[in-house]
Amino acid sequence: MRSSIIILSFFALGIGLALSGLLPQWMLNESLSTYALYLLMLIVGISVGSDNSMSEIFRRMKLVHLLVPIGVILGSLAGAVIISLFIHQISHGTAMAIGAGFGYYSLSAILISGIRGDEAGVVALLANIFREVFTLVMAPFLVKLFGRFSIIASGGATAMDTTLPVIVRFSGKEMTVIAILSGIVLSLLVPVLVPFLLIFFS
């Protein structure tokens, strides 16, 4: 919850600074977000490569565990298409790309902004932040109503980090490996699925 509030605060600060006209011209260059994306991808790669627990996670992985991220992918994309039927300003492809952020708001928002424009990027940012906040707040109710896998599905890519504590607390420690595996798979797919959906389905 705290990290989401911090992200939203910086986002609001950026809007305020841009509207104030106090920013130097070089900071308004659209290519700056592209360079920020490259840096973000580098940091993500370093983070994944330097995590010594990755080998242990993959050693304990079973093929059946992959059904969880597959279910999250199919459910997220199907839900996004259904929502797009009621919001005519957003195409099916853009809606699916937003859903394919899987809660990874920083990366998906930049990707979508670069391909589809700033407006779609803002929608992606807010939608994926809301997904994380919803998971953190509604975790006990999700488990009660839909079972232990529901928090992992709701958390999406964040199941490997920010929403992992509530997953462990309300679903049990035995779900840790599945949650981390699902989060890793979804995080790795975001930079592949989002551009693919925007290019081929919009």
Image (tube, rainbow, N blue to C red):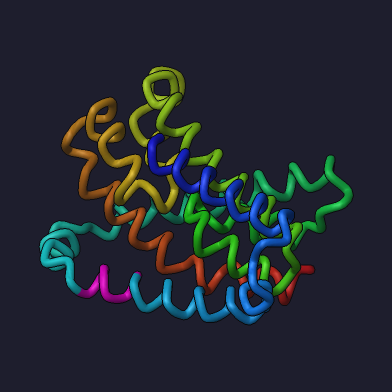
Task: Depth check: give the residue in front, 102 or 85.
Answer: 102
Q: Is residue 55 above or below residue 61?
A: below
Kindly identify the residue that appears in the image at 44 percent across and 33 percent down: 135
Q: Position of residue 89 (x, y in %)?
A: 87, 52
| Residue pictured at 40% horizontal, 31% vertical | 136
Q: Main secondary structure of the magenta part?
A: helix
Residue nearest the observer in this picture, 141 or 40: 40
Residue furthest toward the right?
Answer: 88
Q: Position of residue 82 (x, y in %)?
A: 74, 43
Q: Is 47 above or below relative to 176? A: below
Residue 69: which quarter of the image? bottom left
Measured as percent of width and height from the top left, residue 14 is found at 60, 55
Query: Magenta segment: does it hold 89?
Result: no
Q: Nearer the viewer, residue 178 or 38?
A: 38
Q: Residue at x 46, y 56 (%)?
A: 70
Q: Which residues are magenta?
A: 44-49
Report the quarter where the C terminus lies: bottom right
The single residue placed furthest to the front in the displayed view is 22
Q: How many marks?
A: 0
In the image, what residue occupies the spot 52% across and 81% down? 35
Whether residue 48 sits left or right of residue 72 in the image: it is: left
Q: For residue 63, which quarter of the picture?
A: bottom left
Up the image or down, 29 lies above or below 120; here it is below
Image coordinates of residue 165 in percent, x first then y, are: 26, 36
Figure quadrant of the N terminus: top left
